[in-house]
Each structure stands twice: as structure tokens, then as C-alpha cells.
Amino acid sequence: MSKLNMALPLVAILACCFGCKRDVVEPDDVVAVDGRQKFVGVYDVYDTLGNWRYEMEISVAHDFSPFDSLLIEGWGGAFDVYVQRNIGNISNYLNFIGDFGITDYEGHRWALFSEYDYVFQYNSLVHDTLRMSYLKDNIAFYVADGVPYFRQSYREYAVKRE
């Protein structure tokens, strides 16, 4: 009887091992996601105290460049900026590095650069809010442009409209 008691569980285990097999699930067709689309929209931009500053619009740039990009119109209330952003990049970071000699709406030249700020989580999209941290400086151009010297760091929240 004891041999039978030992053989029954062994037979049950073997039957389960060979009788059950994993269902094979065929993968669905992978749909390419355009990582730029999460940034597209019209934004109201506020300073860190909650005061409205300006309106900004981000759209997908349609050009013949070998790089995919976003067009930001109205950054700082004064600039139109292209930001390289590949279609396959699905991160929440804007990837804005900067632009030297960028011309504002009044024809003056500037250095406009991303400014690292770990606490502020610079240039990242969190839900519907883009946290922007940048430096605006005209030291290389103010004499030739005939304007006063200007340098300022900015911390702004761009909130996407629904």
C-alpha cells in the first residue's frame, strides 16, 4: 500500500507536466508611437509664483531635415525655436540644449540655453505641465545690436490647454 501511495502523486505530477502546455500568444503588430505628439499643443506659461507670462505653441516640424524635430513658437514670448526630437523618443524630456545667436521677434540676437536644475526637473513634461529652465543672455551681441546688456535665468511652468 505504501508503494501505491508514493506512486499516485508521482503519476499525477508527471501527468500534469506533460498534459499541460503553455498557450502560445502571437504578438500583435507593433504600432510605431510618435514621441513628439505628447508635446504638441498650446500652452499657457506661468512663472514659479503662478503669474501668467505668455502663450506658447509646440507643433511637429514638417521640413526636409534628416532629423525629426518640434517647432516651439513663442518661447519666452520672443522666440521661435526648433528642438530636435526623434519620432521614436518617448521620454518626457524636451531635449532642448540651446541656441547661440537666435534672433527674437524684435531682431535682436541672444544666447538661449537650457539651464540644469535638478530640483525643478528642467525641461521635462510631467502630465500636462512642461517645466522649463533656461538662460537668456546677450553678452556677445548687445554692443552690435545697440541694446543694454541682459542676462537672466528663468524657471517657468508651461501648462497645456485642453
Image: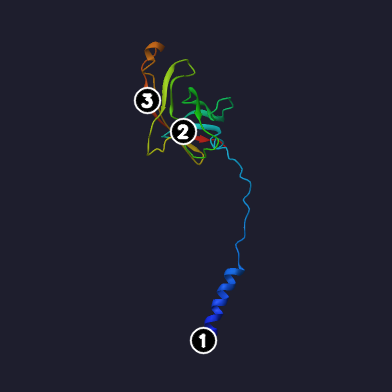
Secondary structure beneath label 2: loop
Question: Of callouts 3 and 2, which one flags the residue occurring earlier in the amino acid sequence?
Answer: 2
User: Mark 1 to mark 3: distance in Å?
Assistant: 87 Å
Tell me residue 79's x, y (percent).
48, 23
Q: Mark 3 highlights which residue?
A: 152
What colour scheme does the image use?
rainbow
Secondary structure beneath label 1: helix
Q: Is residue 117 above or below residue 24?
A: above
Quarter residue 58 falls in: top right
Q: Mark 2 highlights which residue?
A: 95
Please report the residue visible at 42 percent of the width from the left and 35 percent of the height from the top: 122
Q: Residue type at mark 1: give it.
A: Ser
Q: Residue type at mark 2: give it.
A: Asn
Q: Residue type at mark 3: give it.
A: Gln
| Viewer-closest of 69 and 132 | 69
Specify whether residue 83 is in view. yes
